[in-house]
Image: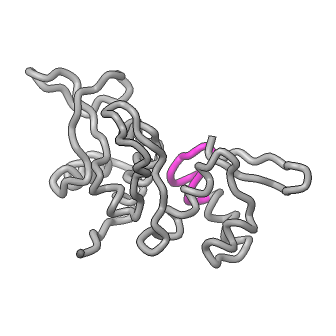
Amino acid sequence: MNQIQLSETQSIILSVACARDDGLIFPVTAKIKGGAVGNVCKSLLKRGLIEEIQATDMNTVWRYDEELGSITLRATPLAYSALGITEATEEAPSKTTRTAPTIEQSKGGKQAMLIEMLKRPKGATIQQVVDATGWLPHTVRGAIAGAIKKKLGLNVVSEKIEGVGRVYRIA
């Protein structure tokens, strides 16, 4: 199977959407300048990585259609696959609920692996991420602060747990 090549902006937008329970593209929290979001979304639509669905929340509207009304965008299973994320399949998810994505270590990138570790209810320590990715501790802290918090706009919280140390997780 050919791997889908994504630009940095495409990867950021898809990563944020795939990290959300509903898989929605909007609202875009990444700081992307100009009309780049629209252009990226059009490209992702054309490639089948996102799809148009009826919007239920006005904060997620992509466009308005005369027949369908408000339309938003959602990541498709192909998007999860392109990022190396597969959905857990204990039971088939309904259209409105999605099971938490899991990473296939051989396919997923290290950033996707980091996001998955931070999404766990218990979160992850710096050492756990170091062991999983092979990064140095300062690289893990930089990825959390830079790529995850600033670029992707995800809310990462940390707390110090006695006997475990500082634990980071996506709120």
Color theme of the render: one colour
Residue 37 in sight here: yes
The quadrant of the picture occupied by the N terminus is bottom left
Residue 25 in sight here: no
Residue lying farthest front? Answer: 90
**Residue 80 drawn in magenta:** no
Query: Which of 126 and 122 lies nearest the eye of the viewer?
Result: 122
Query: Which of 125 and 37 lies nearest the eye of the viewer?
Result: 125
Q: Position of residue 157 (x, y in %)?
A: 70, 45
Drawn side of residue 34 relative to residue 162, left or right: left
Could you tell me which residue is drawn at 60 percent across and 59 percent down?
146
Could you tell me which residue is drawn at 31 percent across and 51 percent down?
36
Could you tell me which residue is drawn at 63 percent across and 71 percent down?
132
Drawn side of residue 122 relative to residue 86, left or right: right
Indicate the quadrant where residue 52 lies.
top left
Magenta region, residue range:
146-155
Query: Which of 143 and 4 lies nearest the eye of the viewer?
Result: 4
Residue lying farthest right? Answer: 162
**Residue 151 drawn in magenta:** yes
